Amino acid sequence: MVGSSTQRLAVQAGDNRLVVESVSKRFGGVVAVQDVSLEVPRGAIVSIIGPNGAGKTSLLNMISGFYKPDTGRVIFDGRDITQKKPSDIAALGIARTFQNIALFSGLTVLDNLMLGRHVRMKAGVLASVVYWGMAQKEDIAHRAACEEIIDFLKLQDLRKQPTASLAYGLRKRVELGRALAVEPSLLLLDEPMGGMNQDEKEDMARYILDVNQERGVTVVLIEHDMGVVMDISDLVVVLDRGRCIAAGTPEEVQRDPAVIQAYLGTAISGEGA
Amino acid sequence: MSEDLEFAFALLLSGASIGLMYSLIALGFVLVYKATDAINFAQGEFVMLAGMIVVTVLGAEAPLIAAIVVVLLVMIGFGFGLEKVVLRPLLGRPVVAVIMATIGVAAVLRGLSPLVLGIETRALPLPIGDEPIAIGPASLPPIQVLGAVVAILFFIVFSWFFKKSRMGIAMRAVADNQQVAQAMGINVERYFAIAWAMAGIVSALGGVVWGAMLGVDVQLALVGLKVFPVVILGGLDSIGGALVGGLIIGIVESLAAGYLDPYVGGGTKDFAPYVLMILVLMIRPYGIFGRRQIERV
């Protein structure tokens, strides 16, 4: 992290899953992200918060390779991934979900998850067309991996359902499952609880904590619900108009005058929301 | 069966078999549009090229099976190569750029073929004879039966491919949302290339059956014009739509030729499909099976 949190997390110094080094991105005359740096320790849950248009999703898009930053670098597990293609970045172990649910709507829950396995499939193009032998054996292993995720997320009854027919909260959960199928070491979640009711939010928060603790996946998430953010995050980064205005533990960030200023008196407290 | 009914049946049968042969070519167009959003104005020229390759190989005293293998391999390579050389550099450009590129490819193919092969129409003989095959009270030339069978086989193979095979499902994912497919680690460009190669395969077989029916020369590319009413009717991105659209266009043509031509002196066959296309555009612009695009503003 930047600022004071660097000392607090001295234990993990040099053991960062992800380092973003002063990236900037402008679209025409609009600066979406300006000189933002970020350190995500291995095993942490880091939340990015900020008002609408603060550049949160743009930052996520630069990490997952959809945008190439104008300046700065993105380092994942010590490797510079700034110029890599999104599909290669996924193969390295960064999976993500999207702000507006982006499931393949014509496909079943299971097929969506199997697509998450795509990048882990070794059998070649010809083998997969013919679908015999090696591809067949591999498919069984991938199917087992998907079933494990289905159990984990309690989606057993929905395997064969087309995703378009599912309720909103379930679709969000399937999208999380598809990202998990990639076997990521870093998971990027863009508003995983956006548009959910309180029960659904609590379920999702629990799944995120389980993913983090049981599966050891490092998580970076964008979220507007301050109650959830303060509850589950190890670190919080605040963006405002493309700049990073504060970063630290949830307690530190809540006390930060710049943050209170940016939110213009919006209550930022663990108890609220 | 009365004579009138027999006449109607014969028209329907002939229309359906020609329609299936249109569907086969339309399938090449749909595969490319579905996966890459590119509108391929050179689909007819692909078929012409394939026909020319076949007659060239046959001209060298090679057996038919060798000609078919060669045309399949060359057209697959052509699909891959075209994607790599012409279309990949246009990724992210407006759709019009891609359309113009395919129109350019079409013009080049049409222009080069007489230079290389001369202008005379060449026969593409298939060892199936020309004794009409009786089907019920009517009969069909063997080439139309073969064309229809090839088309049906292709539709069976492709529907299996898109429903069951790993690659086919990944291709649907690419068609559905390129960005998300990339986030899943799917190499989108590779699937674009595969889609063009598949269009090459379809065109190769289309070239064989259409070339055998019409003879091979530059005019063979004109069958590509029929692709547009077919895919507008069925839906640009629907494989089942290509099948149904082809059948409808083939039957409409045949009925127009059978029932309208005697009164007006001929020629209705050639524009009836377009009248239907315009009607569909007014009523259901995304086609019978096409995906209705919902714009969120």
Image (cartoon, rainbow, N blue to C red):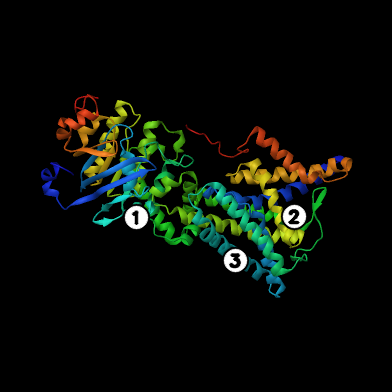
**Is label 2 in a helix, a strand or a loop?**
helix
| Upstream in sequence: badge 2 or badge 3 | 3
Q: Position of residue A119 (x, y in %)?
A: 38, 54
User: Residue B74 — which label?
Assistant: 3
Question: What is the chain letter for disc 3?
Answer: B
**Mark 2 vs mark 1: in front:** 1
How far across and down, in percent of the image, does residue A70 sit? 33, 49
* Count of picture labels: 3
Q: Describe the element under mark 3 as helix, strand or loop.
A: helix
What chain does mark 2 sit on?
B
Q: Chain of mark 1?
A: A
Distance of label 2 from label 3 (alpha carbons): 25 Å
The three-letter amino acid code for the residue at tag 3 is Val
Can I make out residue A99 in this image?
Answer: yes
**Can marks 3 and 1 be said to lie on one chain?**
no
Q: Which mark is residue A83?
A: 1
Separation of residues labelled 3 and 1 (CA atoms): 35 Å
Residue B191 falls left or right of residue A13: right
Q: Quadrant of the N terminus of chain A?
A: top left
Residue at x 33% of width, y 26% of height: A197
Q: Of A190 and A177, which appears nearest the observer?
A: A190
**In this view, the mark in front (3 or 1):** 1
Tell me which residue sits at (35%, 44%) in the image: A26
Where does the image place residue A107, in percent across and percent down from the top left?
Answer: 47, 42
Cα–Cα gap, marks 2 and 1:
53 Å
In this picture, residue A103 sits left or right of residue B149:
left
Q: Nearer the viewer, mark 2 or mark 3?
A: 3
Work out which quarter of the rendered image holds the C terminus of chain A and state it: top left
Q: Quadrant of residue A98?
A: top left
Disc 2 designates what residue? B144
